[in-house]
Image: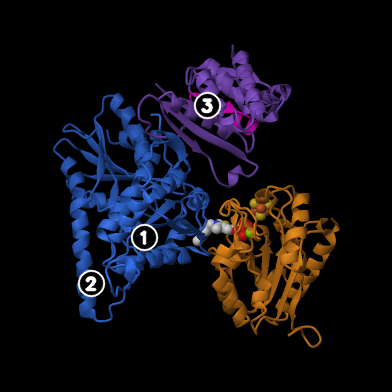
Chain colours: A orange, B blue, C purple
């Protein structure tokens, strides 16, 4: 993949701790490259979640914080308000953002906090070994839905972009996927837009990456991408939900 | 021997809870207790029980509050960071006098810490943790068998006193496999009877046999005089528990002990190995292992400090928490030495022997 | 009698299962047993190891610092645990993944290409069973019959072919150790 040719300045010379074929590394690169391109490295900071990307605080080459499970948007709020001259993002998984951290993300978005949120949706709890996530698909088997997710008993997957899009304050909301090279190129554009808006102090920006977890899905990386295209994309449709920066602005 | 199965502590305690009539379980995944929630996910449907993965530990403990208020046997489990989140709910359970069982498979802290075994939540479990004047009965297992046995003991104690009970375990006991023998499954009829003992206070339908009633599940008493009565009533119950329920194990405790060690849970296992070796070399060292860490065996420890005992050693997988209770029990009669291990590391018998040998 | 053991290898090589089969068999023979795995991120790609204790009396510490018996399925395992094996102890080494074996005096070694042998038997997965065979032959911790009965009751209806391969692997290990 052309995009991962050289290590961006904003990534440290530390090897990723992710499984082979995991998309967290790709998402990290997109963010780091964009920070480089926008010349933001000196005033950038971010918040790592609790999840497989917990070590994100080690990987980015600028100051980083690590938050309690689900609380990254609250931590980022405190950081941004304490040093408004800095650009702040959070990086969160689906368990972190859409289960335990639901209150924090909804209220950070509702306040229109001037932060960017990068949300990696792999439909499972990766770090803890494959338990059900709020984004686990109906019928999907995980270690805590061993008979398949029964939507009648525990509900349907949460569509976070759609949920946040009901709020007035958010400035930009887009869902992209990391499931092929062209999709990754599109995802990069979305990251560029989010961080540009962040730099310009426009408001709350949110990107969801539809991703994979080969290890806990029990599939190899290629099959995982295929599975995600066939099963996740129909439920989590990519698209721009909100962009107040465009002519007329969607909503 | 025939009925023994080799099982992880996390799974054994879940199985034992189901056998003792627990049909409602609410929790959120966290290492090193995830096998417990996963076992419940698999087995609860088979006994027509409720397994629900909550959106957070905060939600889980409040689901427990709701179900306990209906008079049913209900349980939750987590590991240290998640237990911290449950503390508010635990205070409410205690205030509303609700029986429930909470399992903590402790890991290294503070904060996110790590996922290896630790005993750093002793203060939180035994001295509060949540707000207000309340106590939890806290049981500290040191083998997989004992971990499993404590499931039914906990439900019985919770029902008997209408208080929440915590099992204070750790990552080593959760992950380790040992042979376990289980009690029989309680029958549906027995479980129903267990529920009926709570009819005079729990929420249930009028058809349940008692005619019209108005029961309240509540911890609010806005009138200070009423709250005072409520808290003094709690005090009476706690005194009763202190009188009746203290449990400890004595290991080579005798009239000629030169040293007495005190340790609980996993740490006690390692200490046993160390004193076995030292006693084989001709020493006479005993161990007291508190099985209930609240109520605490103060008197039982005090009794072992006779003329021959020169020193007391306390070993914990923390910076020194239970040692404060041991000092209260010893009451200055002999010096109390402490050795801790933190970071999720477990001391070796050799390290313990070295510590003791320094005082020979 | 108390035997302390450590089995170690890459995740997926079956080191933890060696411990489980030995503990289970020893339990059926009426012994006290404990099985304590390493867990956590080190399992992802790193080494997975398990401490097993088999004893006639109650087991105090399940943590093994100086094992009597150690199986190293890869080099990092041998480097990590080899030096702490007790005098007169036994070290089983998978030659295929341990290019660098420095033998200690006073310790019994069985060095064999377990990957190669298991492939000859017909399935990579039985690699760990060869190691168990070696331990059965070299020690009296468990009997072949106990493990064979256990495997038979577990696998007979589910996968008779795998059962046959497993039993062959154990026997091969016993031969190697003779
Ligand atoms: C309060 C608290 N509860 C639970 C955990 C355990 N835990 C760690 S990561 C995680 C879920 C991670 O899943 P997700 O956010 O989807 O990230 P992924 O690993 O899939 O990238 C959980 C439940 C914790 N560390 N703290
Ligand atoms: S467990 Fe899944 S999400 Fe976590 S690093 Fe591995 S592949 Fe990625
Ligand atoms: Mg996830």
Given residues B207 and B32, the one toward you in this image is B207
- Judged from the image, the secondary structure of the residue bearing numbered disc 1 is loop
In 3D space, how far apart are the residues under numbered discs 1 and 2 (Cα atoms)? 23 Å
Q: In the structure shown, which secondary structural element does the residue marked by tag 2 occupy?
A: helix
- Asked which quadrant contains residue B278, the reply is top left
Question: Circle 3: is it few (<14), some (14-19), or many (20+) Cα within 10 Å?
Answer: some
Q: Find residue B242 and name its label.
A: none
Question: Are there few (<14), some (14-19), or many (20+) residues within 10 Å of tag 2?
Answer: some
Q: Residue furthest left?
A: B307
Q: Which mark is residue B230?
A: 2
Q: Is residue C85 magenta?
A: no
Relative placement, left or right, of A143 versus A122 is left
State which chain disc 2 sits on: B
- Between the residue at mark 3 and the residue at mark 1, the CA separation in whole angstroms equals 39 Å
Inspect this view and state whether residue A115 appears: no
Q: Position of residue C27 (x, y in %)?
A: 44, 28
Residue at mark 3: chain:
C
Q: Quickly name the residue at label 3.
A: C150
Question: In the image, is the residue at mark 3 within 8 Å of ligand 2 by its beta carbon?
Answer: no
Chain ID for label 1? Answer: B
> What residue appears at the point 20 percent right and 47 percent down from the top-left corner?
B330
> Looking at the image, which is closer to me, A39 or B296?
B296
* Picture residue at 38% right of the left edge, 45% below the top: B185
Q: Position of residue C107 (x, y in %)?
A: 53, 18
Residue B72 is labelled as 1
Displayed-image quarter of ligand 3: bottom right
Residue C101 position within the rendered picture, expressed as x and y whole percent measured from the top left: 64, 23
Quadrant, the C terminus of chain A: bottom right
* Residue B251 seen in render: yes
Question: Which residue range is magenta in the image?
Answer: C68-79
Image x and y of residue B286, in percent: 25, 35
């Amino acid at each position: 993949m052309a995009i991962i040719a050289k290590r961006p300045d904003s990534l440290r010379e530390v090897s990723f701790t992710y499984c082979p074929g995991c998309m967290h590394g790709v998402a990290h690169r997109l963010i780091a490259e964009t920070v480089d391109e926008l010349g933001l490295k000196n005033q950038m900071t971010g918040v790592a979640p609790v999840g497989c990307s917990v070590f994100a605080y080690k990987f980015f080459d600028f100051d980083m914080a690590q938050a309690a499970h689900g609380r990254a948007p609250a931590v980022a709020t405190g950081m941004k308000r304490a040093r408004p001259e800095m650009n702040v993002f959070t990086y969160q998984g689906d368990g972190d953002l859409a289960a335990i951290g639901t209150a924090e993300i909804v209220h950070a978005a509702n306040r229109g906090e001037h932060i960017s949120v990068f949300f990696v949706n792999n439909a499972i709890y990766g770090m803890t070994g494959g338990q059900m996530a709020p984004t686990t698909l109906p019928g999907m088997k995980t270690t805590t839905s061993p008979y398949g997710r029964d939507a009648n008993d525990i509900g349907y997957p949460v569509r976070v972009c759609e949920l946040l899009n009901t709020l007035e304050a958010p400035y930009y909301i887009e869902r992209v996927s990391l499931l092929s090279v062209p999709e990754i190129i599109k995802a990069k554009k979305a990251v560029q837009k989010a961080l540009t808006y962040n730099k310009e102090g426009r408001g709350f920006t949110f990107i969801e990456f539809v991703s994979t977890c080969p290890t806990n899905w029990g599939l190899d990386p290629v099959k995982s991408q295929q599975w995600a295209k066939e099963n996740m994309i129909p439920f989590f449709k990519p698209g721009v939900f909100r962009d107040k920066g465009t002519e007329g602005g969607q909503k | 021997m025939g009925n023994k199965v080799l099982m992880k502590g996390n799974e054994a305690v879940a199985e034992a809870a189901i056998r003792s009539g627990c049909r409602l379980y609410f929790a959120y995944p966290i290492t090193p207790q995830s096998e417990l929630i996963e076992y419940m996910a698999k087995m609860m449907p088979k006994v027509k029980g409720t397994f629900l993965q909550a959106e957070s530990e905060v939600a889980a403990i409040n689901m427990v509050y709701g179900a306990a208020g209906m008079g049913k046997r209900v349980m939750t489990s987590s590991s240290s960071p998640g237990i911290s989140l449950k503390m508010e709910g635990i205070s409410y359970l205690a205030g509303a006098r609700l029986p429930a069982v909470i399992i903590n498979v402790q890991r290294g802290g503070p904060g996110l810490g790590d996922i290896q075994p630790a005993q750093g939540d002793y203060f939180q479990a035994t001295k509060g943790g949540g707000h207000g004047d309340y106590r939890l009965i806290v049981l500290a297992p040191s083998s997989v068998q004992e971990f499993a046995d404590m499931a039914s003991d906990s439900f019985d104690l919770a029902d008997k006193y209408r208080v929440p009970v915590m099992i204070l375990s750790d990552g080593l006991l959760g992950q380790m496999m040992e042979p376990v023998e289980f009690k029989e499954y309680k029958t549906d009829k027995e479980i129903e009877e267990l529920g009926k003992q709570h009819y005079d206070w729990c929420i249930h339908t009028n058809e349940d046999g008692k005619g019209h009633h108005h029961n309240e599940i509540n911890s609010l008493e806005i009138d200070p005089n009423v709250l005072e009565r409520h808290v003094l009533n709690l005090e009476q119950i706690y005194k009763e528990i202190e009188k009746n329920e203290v449990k400890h194990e004595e290991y080579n405790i005798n009239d000629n002990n030169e040293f007495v060690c005190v340790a609980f849970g996993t740490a006690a296992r390692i200490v046993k190995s160390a004193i076995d070796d030292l006693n084989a070399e001709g020493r006479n060292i005993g161990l007291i292992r508190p099985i209930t860490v609240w109520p605490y065996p103060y008197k039982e420890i005090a009794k072992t400090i006779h003329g021959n005992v020169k020193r007391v050693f306390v070993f914990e997988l923390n910076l020194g928490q239970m040692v404060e209770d041991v000092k209260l029990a010893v009451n200055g009669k002999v010096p109390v030495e402490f050795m801790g291990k933190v970071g999720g590391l477990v001391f070796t018998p050799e390290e313990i022997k070295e510590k003791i040998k320094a005082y020979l | 009698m108390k035997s302390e053991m450590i089995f170690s290898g890459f995740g997926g090589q079956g080191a933890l299962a060696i411990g489980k089969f030995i503990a289970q068999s020893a339990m059926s023979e009426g012994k006290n047993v404990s099985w304590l795995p390493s867990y956590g991120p080190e399992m992802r790609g790193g080494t997975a190891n398990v401490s097993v204790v088999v004893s006639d009396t109650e087991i105090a510490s399940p943590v093994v610092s100086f094992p009597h018996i150690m199986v190293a399925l890869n080099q990092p395992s041998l480097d990590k645990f080899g030096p702490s094996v007790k005098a007169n102890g036994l070290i089983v080494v998978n030659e295929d993944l341990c290019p660098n074996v420095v033998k200690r005096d006073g310790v019994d070694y069985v060095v064999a290409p377990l990957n190669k042998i298991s492939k000859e038997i017909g399935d990579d997965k039985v690699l760990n069973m060869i190691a168990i065979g070696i331990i059965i032959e070299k020690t009296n911790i468990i009997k072949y019959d106990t493990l064979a009965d256990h495997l038979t009751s577990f696998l007979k209806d589910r996968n008779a072919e795998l059962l046959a391969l497993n039993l062959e692997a154990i026997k091969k290990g016993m031969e190697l150790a003779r």
